[in-house]
Image (cartoon, rainbow, N blue to C red):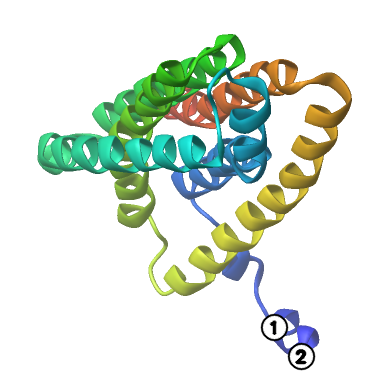
Amino acid sequence: MIKEVFLGKKPSDFHINGIVKAFIVSEIFLWSSWNAITPIFAIFAATKISGGSTEVAAASFSTYLVVRVVFELISGRYLSKSTDIQKFTMSTVGIILISLGYIGFAMTKNVSSLFLFYGVIGMGLGIASPAKNSLFSLHLDKDKEVTEWSIYDGFVFMGMAMATTIGGFVASNYGFSFLFYLVAITNLLSIIPYLLYAKKEKSAE
């Protein structure tokens, strides 16, 4: 089956344009960071936060979802007629907010802060997601849309799978605070592919 997929293909059949490449690499960093903490967040809330519990963890995650929905609607309306540069900018702002939320978790000692910083993360993803997804969708290569979506899913989910195990190991051996600082840094790395692409495009003008 694998032979049929690759044999007889021209090099151009495997070409992916710059924005799509940047998006995929960026998403690997972003969602790997996310998955390093999300599966074990309830343990953190229940054992490391005064007054925390699994119910509190679930409720704070709901707060993230509600805030994200609100900001996605706002961001989606604002970006409906925006340029690629504006979308790059909004993606960067959102990613920075997500990292600030992770740093907030590292310093959190009470329940109210959990809700606050999950809200910040929801705001960040709400701002960034419409911009990032729009860039990806608009720049998919013609007649390769299905292939590029599958490549996106494959690489991102592999990153998430590895990050989940690594997150559990880091939290167990070095503590949750170290893990939150680590994912804040790796999440910021998701900005770099966009910056490199933007720099390349500028120099090509």
How many residues crowd mark 2 within 10 Å: few (<14), some (14–19), many (20+)? Answer: few
Q: Where does the C terminus fall, quadrant-wise?
A: top left
Between residue 98 and residue 23, name the one nearer to us.
98
Question: Which element carries disc 2, helix, strand or loop?
Answer: loop
Residue located 16% across and 42% down the image: 73
Residue located 42% across and 29% down the image: 201
- Asked whether the viewer can see residue 202, the reply is no
Residue located 67% across and 36% down the image: 43
**Residue 5 placement (x, y as % from top left):** 69, 83
In the rendered structure, find residue 5 and report the number of the disc placed on it: 1
**Residue 113 placement (x, y as % from top left):** 44, 16
Question: Which element carries disc 1, helix, strand or loop?
Answer: helix
Q: In 3D space, how far apart are the residues under numbered discs 2 and 1 (Cα atoms)? A: 7 Å
Q: Give the labeled residue for mark 2.
A: 1
Q: Are marks 2 and 1 in contact (CB under 8 Å)?
A: yes
* Up-down relation of residue 143 to residue 111 (above or below): below
How many residues crowd mark 1 within 10 Å: few (<14), some (14–19), many (20+)? Answer: few
The type of residue carrying mark 1 is: Val
